[in-house]
Image (cartoon, grey):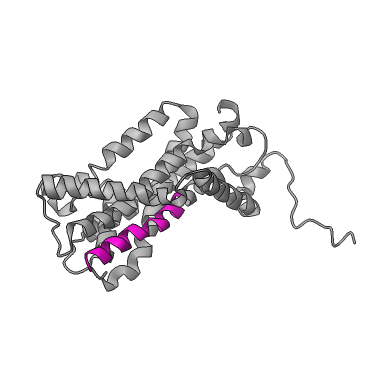
Amino acid sequence: MEQALKPEYELIIEAGKSERHYWRDLWVFRELFLFLSWRDIAVRYKQTFIGVTWALIQPLITLVVMTVVFSVIAKMDAGVEAPYAVMVAAGTLPWQFFATSLGNTSNSLVTNANMLSKVYFPRLIVPVSAVIVSFVDFLISFAILALVMVWFQFVPSWRIVFLPLFTLLAFSAAIGIGLWMATLNVEYRDFRYIVPFIIQFGVFVTPVGYNASKVPDSLYWLYVLNPMVGVIEGFRWSIIGGDSPINWTSIAISAGICVVLIITSIKFFRRMERTFADVI
């Protein structure tokens, strides 16, 4: 009977133990990760009039505005054989995922301040679970892209099989920058005002409503330092196919920047994590 009641694992609080077993503890607390993700998803749509339809409204409005502004008013061409709305939809989905992730992640630690100050668990679980919530919205919003393709009778390219790779790249960019913002927001609450500005400004320096080929060559190498440039170029190349332009150098730069962001953000997060309970 005693053998049957033996716990699957034991958690012993001792000096230095959390540092040595941090990554193992992430697995031990996997159920907390799932709980936080599910809780945020449920709260997001609880007592809303149209429920998960909100996940469709945001990218749909962005799609309509971008198409009207750049195609109708600015008279810009798509630069590809696909309809302009399809090109914009292929850029709107990853950008909306990134923007939502950045907003949710930056506030995740402050929102869960009570948990951080009372119990031990790897704090990395909190911001990463916030990205998962945004990823669920991202999957739902694919219905917008499907509807646009059906409306314009556009068939995606066979290259769509590579879409998960660029989705992973978008996920990496969201986590890398999100961890930086979440950590800085705990230390300096001014960042809760800076993040919305970054999102608003970022939509214009990211090829969401236009093709990256429209950017002058003299500015392109500065332009591709934005990791979402490579992500959106990859999305369009995967979905539109055909003559959709793609610069593999910019993809490599985006991937490299994402790797650097993840490594540096995790190191910074881990260094500041021990002070969260004191300053939050």
Q: Position of residue 89 (x, y in %)?
A: 27, 56
Q: Position of residue 9 (x, y in %)?
A: 74, 55
Residue furthest bottom in the image: 158
In this view, the residue in front, 197 or 272, is 197
* Quadrant assignment, res 195: top left
Relative to 14, 144 lies left or right: left
In the rendered structure, which segment of residues is drawn in magenta?
134-153
The residue depicted at 12 percent of the width and 44 percent of the height is: 73
Q: Position of residue 25 (x, y in %)?
A: 64, 50
Look at the picture and state if 97 lies above or below 149: above
* Quadrant assignment, res 273: top right
In this view, the residue in front, 261 or 3, is 3
Residue furthest front in the image: 49
The residue depicted at 63 percent of the width and 36 percent of the height is: 115
Q: Quadrant of the N terminus?
A: bottom right
Relative to 209, 113 lies left or right: right
* Quadrant assignment, res 252: bottom left
